[in-house]
Amino acid sequence: MTPSETVLASPLPGASDDAPPDYVRELEQAAHYLPLAQREQLHRAWAIGAAAHAGQTRKSGEPYITHPVAVAKVLADQGLDVETLVAAILHDTLEDTPLTPEAITTGFGATVTELVDGVTKLDKLQFRDRQEANAESFRKMLLAMSRDLRVILIKLADRLHNMRTLGAQSTEARRRIATETLEIYAPIAQRLGMNLIKAELQDLGFRALHPWRHAVLEKRIRTQPVMRRESMVQIEAQLAQKLAKEKLQHRLVSRVKSPWSIYSKMHAEHKSFTQVMDVFGFRIVVGTVADCYHALGVVHAAYKPLDARFRDFIAIPKANGYQSLHTVLFGPYGSPIEVQIRTEDMDLIAEKGIAAHWSYKHGGNTSGAQSRAQGWINNLVESQRATGSSLEFLENVKVDLFPDEVYLFTPKGDILALPRNATALDFAYAVHTDVGNHAVAARVDGKLVPLRNKLASGQRVEIITARSSAPKPQWLEFVVSGKARTSIRQQLKQLEHEDAVQLGHRMLDRALEAQATSLERVPAQRVDAFLHEHRYPRLEALLADIALGNRMPAQVAQALVREKAARQKTARVVEPIPRSEENILITGAERGVISFAQCCLPIPGDDIMGYHTTGKGIVVHRLDCPNLAEYRKSPDRWVAIGWDRKVTGDFPTAMRIELDNRPGALAQVAAAIAEAESNIDRLEYIERDTNISAIRFQIEVRDRKHLAEVMRRVRRLKVVLGVARI
């Protein structure tokens, strides 16, 4: 009998007529909504889990099985189905016990096995460090979430119970787990609309990271002044009376701020505790959507609303499905009154999110909150497929978990939700990856704006595209959404690879010309043999490696034409390959494989030579560069290059300008450079005394002719004593 079969065949812990432990009875009470037969499945799952975890204890000393049962209770409090609760009880068995997936499938079905596998960590794999292991675990969990959203519900419940029992961990572990909770799991709970779990995760994380601050704030909240409590009651009574007169059936509750929400607001808005607490919060829950707007009119009649502080999340729901009316009123005691108005269904979704309307309650129909959550997960799955590493993907997910969002309209009237500070380019990538890749500008409310333009809620955005347009590295400096960042990086890598392949092809052709042949004339079998010998999957990979300096083209050329010499019994010395006189022409736009030396800053029109650098490709130097003598020691790495006729763009160069130390002199020089259609990148003083300053200007020019024009304009200034290119 295998260990798994032994576990499944194990009798219930304790005698059959013994009452189950208290923690199991608490789970059964929380799952009272399930039929008797399904509650018996929970009992059987506990028995199997307890047998599988037999002898294992938590750091607190309790039997390990108490943890997964507590996780199941958290989910039962949310009203989840029996498969989710069983998977929660068994969620650590695959990782920590002999129980196998086959055994779980036999006992509870394939769905439970998939849920358990989705939350299983990857501790058995070898990673460089814990951070990468956590990131890879998160990536795996996300893929499981895309198949079944209940995976993340189990994971959130698991994290919540771990946070509730964090005291047994070391100080370092508490800080690490709390930080991860605040950065990843609490925002995910918020993104899925699960505000009750989100709020508790945030507060527990805050208490673990800053126990003293948490204790001080908690005490201040408990000991609020009597006057404030009386004011709260007075406002509540007045609102209730006004609503009752309008015959609105309602539930009115005051909202109490948590230590974390107070701390966050104090920190973000630089406010004192008194300023943050000097706000009265109420929630009004009514029967229908029409009642929500009716109630809004009632509260606005009772107290004057503050301008620009009204938000309608019923007409335009948040991305997590949250719906409510938000308004801020000017209160009778000089303090703002924050009021939220929603229906009972909206309140349920606001508290429990996607768990509020799980499919077992609706005969398998997916609710709006679930649809939005599934859409978000699917976008993340698409993003992770295009991401190079788990750590990069995890950073993109953190970006996507910004709590504040802007809501924008497409030309067709569809609504898109984007992170705070999103730009027109983020909007373009949200519409479609191809739209983003070929975007050139945008129209916001009919006005033409650049792609870096930040957007505000309610704006109508139209993206202008051009097939010739392609992503630029500078785009990464202003996009904020994870999808945009991932798509741009992927496209830039693809463009760099294409440029590297083209340049590598030209370099290898030049080297083969010296051997009186070409790549097309080299037998395909010989090329395939070389690729196989050096483990290249395709010829393109070899050509890219040549361009990046990881393989010397002359050596590759020798290997490809040395067929006869290889069959000779005695080795002979290979003669040096004469260099081809024909230059490789460059435009300067070759991404990732051509760079320009900072020591001499070459520009179009200069006589240049390329130096082949491992991993960097070709570094371009001027022929009069002072470092040339050092690089001549490696002649095999020199590449004969020249400027193509179609050179476009701006190139950095530097000038030394000597000028009088008189007020406004520097401004005159800057104006002259601008009039010559050049930009100043940076400047620094080389020498300075009471009368004369020598300043190094690094500017951008198109070519030598443009540089000469800039220097002429600067030289005409009376304050300038001398100009020279550095």
Image (cartoon, rainbow, N blue to C red):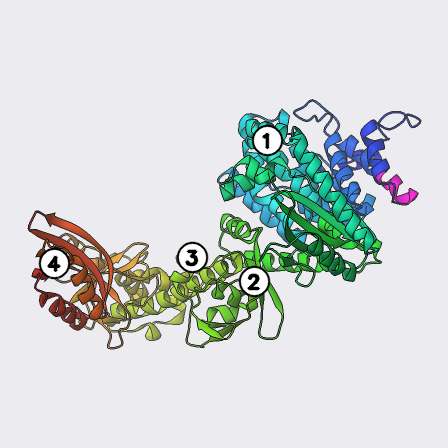
Asked whether residue 648 appears in the rendered view, the answer is yes
CB of mark 1 within 8 Å of CB of mark 3?
Answer: no
Are there few (<14), some (14-19), or many (20+) residues within 10 Å of tag 4?
many
Decide which of tag 3 and tag 4 comes sooner along the chain: 3
Q: Which residues are magenta?
A: 35-44
The residue under label 1 is 217
Around disc 3, counting alpha carbons within 10 Å, would you say few (fewer than 14), some (14 to 19), or many (20 or more)? few
Q: Earlier in the sequence, mark 1 or mark 3?
A: 1
Q: Nearer the viewer, residue 116 or 458?
A: 458
The magenta stretch spans residue 38: yes
Residue 323 seen by the camera: no
First-in-chain label (2 vs 4)? 2
In the picture, measured across the screen, residue 309 lies left or right of residue 268, that is: right
Residue, far front: 332
Q: Nearer the viewer, mark 1 or mark 3?
A: 1
> Which residue was labeled with disc 4?
657
Q: Amino acid at mark 1?
A: Leu
* Residue 52 relative to residue 660: left or right: right
| Distance from the alpha carbon under mark 1 to that under mark 3 | 62 Å
| Helix, strand or loop status at disc 2 | loop
Indicate the position of residue 669 as horizontal and vertical percent values: 16, 62
Nearer to us of marks 3 and 4 is 4
Above/below status of 406 relative to 428: above
Q: Which mark is residue 349?
A: none
- Please tell me whether mark 3 sits on a helix, a strand or a loop: loop
Against 586, residue 204 (above or below) is above
What's the CA distance linking mark 2 and mark 4? 49 Å
Asked whether the beta carbons under mark 3 and mark 4 sit within 8 Å of each other, the answer is: no
Say which mark, if any, is on residue 535. Answer: 3
Report if the CB atoms under discs 3 and 2 are less than 8 Å apart: no
Q: Residue at x 80, y 46 (%)?
A: 79
